[in-house]
Image: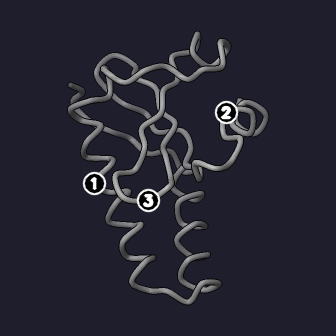
Amino acid sequence: MVSKVIISDYAQQQLENYVLYVLLKKENPQAAKSVTADALHTRDRLLDVAKSLRFLEDKDLAALGYRKILFSSHDYLFIYRVVDDIAYVEATYHQLQDYENIFKTEVL
């Protein structure tokens, strides 16, 4: 368990971009609401499971303590790490993206 979850501005902006894509490009407001709700649910799940999930496959990212959590009902995920008793969500990606390499080049 962790005491709180902090979502970075970068991860929040990525999530907002995905939601806007669903809302404006796909013209599906219900799906946009559903993705948002799933993101909030996933954030809340991190409180209980953050320390128990596996590290990312990339050795460099794993050595830095990065892990992922999949959204429950949509094909998105958070990349996060735990420092002391806090889970820091650093990025949001679609599962079909090469998210580990993208994260490594864009964020680190």
Q: Secondary structure at mark 3?
A: loop
Distance from the alpha carbon under mark 1 to that under mark 3: 11 Å
98 horizontally vs 82: left or right: right
What is the residue that sits farthest to the bottom in this orientation?
27
Could you tell me which quadrant the C terminus lies in? top right
24 to 100, vertically: above or below = below
Compared across the picture, whether 7 is left or right of 16 comes to left
Residues 96 and 29: in front is 96
Q: Amino acid at mark 2?
A: Glu
- CB contact under 8 Å: marks 1 and 3: no
Q: How many residues crowd mark 1 within 10 Å: few (<14), some (14–19), many (20+)?
A: some
Q: CA distance from mark 2 to mark 1?
A: 23 Å
Residue drawn at x 55%, y 49% is 92
Residue 74's disc is 3
- Name the quarter where the N terminus is drawn: top left
Q: Element type at marker 1?
A: helix
Q: Which residue is mark 1?
A: 41
Q: Residue beneath label 2, please?
A: 100
